[in-house]
Amino acid sequence: MGRYIGPACRLCRREGVKLFLKGDRCFTPKCAVEKRAYAPGQHGQARKKVSPYALRLREKQKLRKIYGILETQFSNYMGKAERMKGMTGENLLGLLERRLDNVIFRIGLASSRNQARQLVLHGHFLVNSKKVNVPSFIVRPGDKVQIHDSSRSKVLIKSNLESAQSKNIPSWIQMDVSTGAAQVMAFPKREEIDVSVRENLVVEFYSR
């Protein structure tokens, strides 16, 4: 199955929470979750009994949709997280957070992860002074992320850079808002990842 290209707000309504897929719109009264806080479709408002399997499935789907990852790729991340030391759920979140497109979103140079993915694909960013156009590139402590010199004049890049000054930058990233350059200082900890997902249920889903 290819990447979902339908209405993004439909995904939020299906999960019953804001996944912040539409950037600034998610913070306004126009947010679909606030206007229609029930699942889409003819039977969206019907009460449904949720089984333990369905509960774990929904948590997995929610996390996958937040980061915009396909099923096979997500499964690969899970396998890698299981082979790492420490708690599998936290390892999984740490890997997803260190994706280049997510880092661009976290430091405010994109209004959503989807926009960040497009900007990375178009080669607007450098990692350690080298152009990287792979959204799934995993950054490590010490890596420096910056805007490509030829992209600074882009209207969207300039606009995002101006708005980045009001963003809450995660503590594991240090950013110079005047230049748009950021450096990864450490691996992200669970308390530094503001994603409302019960990662233990995701691990249980793959352990069944």
Image (cartoon, rainbow, N blue to C red):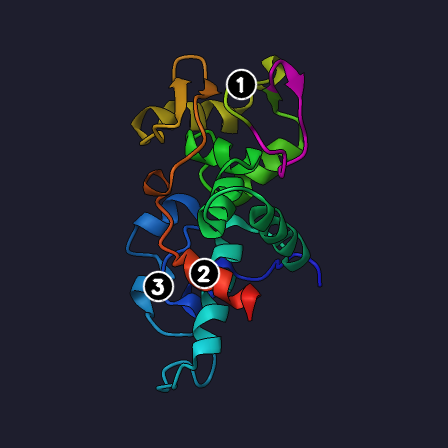
Residue 39 found in image quarter: bottom left
Residue 2 vs residue 127: left or right? right
Residue 40 appears in view: no
Q: Are marks 3 and 2 in contact (CB under 8 Å)?
A: yes
Quadrant (top left/top right/bottom left/bottom right) for the N terminus? bottom right
In this picture, is 189 found above or below 142? below
Name the foreground residue: 48 vs 154.
48
Q: Marks 1/3: CA distance?
A: 34 Å
Q: Which residue is mark 1?
A: 146
Image height of 5 relative to 121, above or below: below
The residue sitting at 28% across, 56% down in the picture is: 29
**Magenta range:** 127-139
Task: Check disc 1: other Cα within 10 Å, few if <14, some if 14-19, many if 20+.
Answer: many
> Which residue lies under the disc numbered 2?
9
Label of residue 111 in the image: none
Q: Which mark is residue 33?
A: 3
- Badge 2 amino acid: Cys
| Camera-nearest residue between 97 and 108 | 97
